[in-house]
Image (cartoon, grey):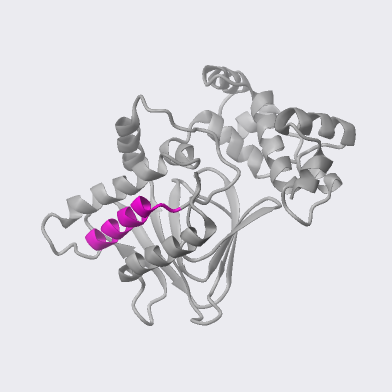
Amino acid sequence: MPTATADQKCLRTQLLRRLAGLGAPAGTFGSVPHGAGSGVRVFGYCIQERERIARTRMEHPVVVVVLSGTKEVWRGDIAQTFAAGVPFVIPAGMDFDLVNNPDPVTGRYESICITVDETLRHTLRSTLRGLPVTTSNPDRLDVDLTPELVEAFGHAASALTGLGVAVAATLARYRILAILLLLSETPVAGMLIAVGRKEQVEAIICADPGHAWQADEVAATLGIGTSTLRRQLNGAGTSFPEVLLSVRMATAGALLGASGYSVTQAAQAAGYVSRSHFSRRVQAAHGKTPRQLKVAI
């Protein structure tokens, strides 16, 4: 069960304290690499002015913790804002708009990022072989903290800042893997382990759920034939219409569960012109009508 809100605030404070050693030195801005020679790609990022990065796409999943300020991650019309001390994952292959907001007191935006490259993903998949892992992209990108996860981040930070020790480089890799293993027990697990064909199709549709997507258009975007795409999705136990519907219903659920969006706006964002058709689909997917979902917030 998620830890209570008060406990989460306490854990975020502890996490920021444990990660303080990875902060950029005074007067240093831009990217700051950590753990050179460790075989893991960890870097800090620090700026003084608000920054918007439009339509960026990650080659590999990235685990991020904001140290100062806030970060907004936009997927189409859906945004999440992450405060300092909240771990979250930016998945690979999806288009996002990113906004980095400096802290109004310190005047700095700063974050720590762990790139989950193919080597790390392979190690993680091998370690988790045979264990149940959620593979769908979740509605939210953030992760509830636990004392164990705070400790894992703290141990990794200690290893990354102590690479003068002979064994520290190897230790840093194991410490990063420990973080990923704990994250594999959360809803973001699938985004870390693989970027399979189903997830790639989800990522393309997620960039614009309201678009009238066709299988041939998505296949062309992926650089494969339509029949190949259908065969690969069938091998993954799904189909193009099923993936399209899943993404659209996830979009609808997120918008209907947020303030500021009407049922009509949610329907349009999810690719539906007919309100009645949209209502039937939402009720089948979420067990409630769109208006019932709006009342629940």
* Residue 39 visible at all: no
Q: Is residue 293 left or right of residue 134?
A: right
- Residue 50 image offset from top left, x and y in percent: 58, 73
Q: Position of residue 147 (x, y in %)?
A: 36, 54
Q: Is residue 151 magenta?
A: yes
> Closest to the observer: 138 or 32?
138
* Res. 187 in view: yes
Single out the residue that lies furthest toward the left: 166
Q: Position of residue 96 (x, y in %)?
A: 59, 52
* 60 versus 109 height, above or below: above
- Left or right: 259 as drawn, with respect to 147: right
Residue drawn at the location 21% of the way across and 56% of the way down: 37
Does residue 53 show up magenta in the picture?
Answer: no
Residue that appears at 75% across and 46% down: 296
Task: Name the magenta segment's main secondary structure.
Answer: helix
Residue at 41%, 58% in the rendered image: 113
Q: In this figure, what is the number of numbered marks?
A: 0
Residue 174, above or below 103: above
Residue located at (86% from left, 45% from top): 264
Which image quadrant is residue 201 in? Answer: top right
Q: Quick check: 130 left or right of 97?
A: left
In this rendered view, identify the residue nearer to me: 29 or 4: 4
Q: Position of residue 141 (x, y in %)?
A: 54, 49
Query: In the rendered structure, which segment of residues is drawn in magenta?
Result: 145-160
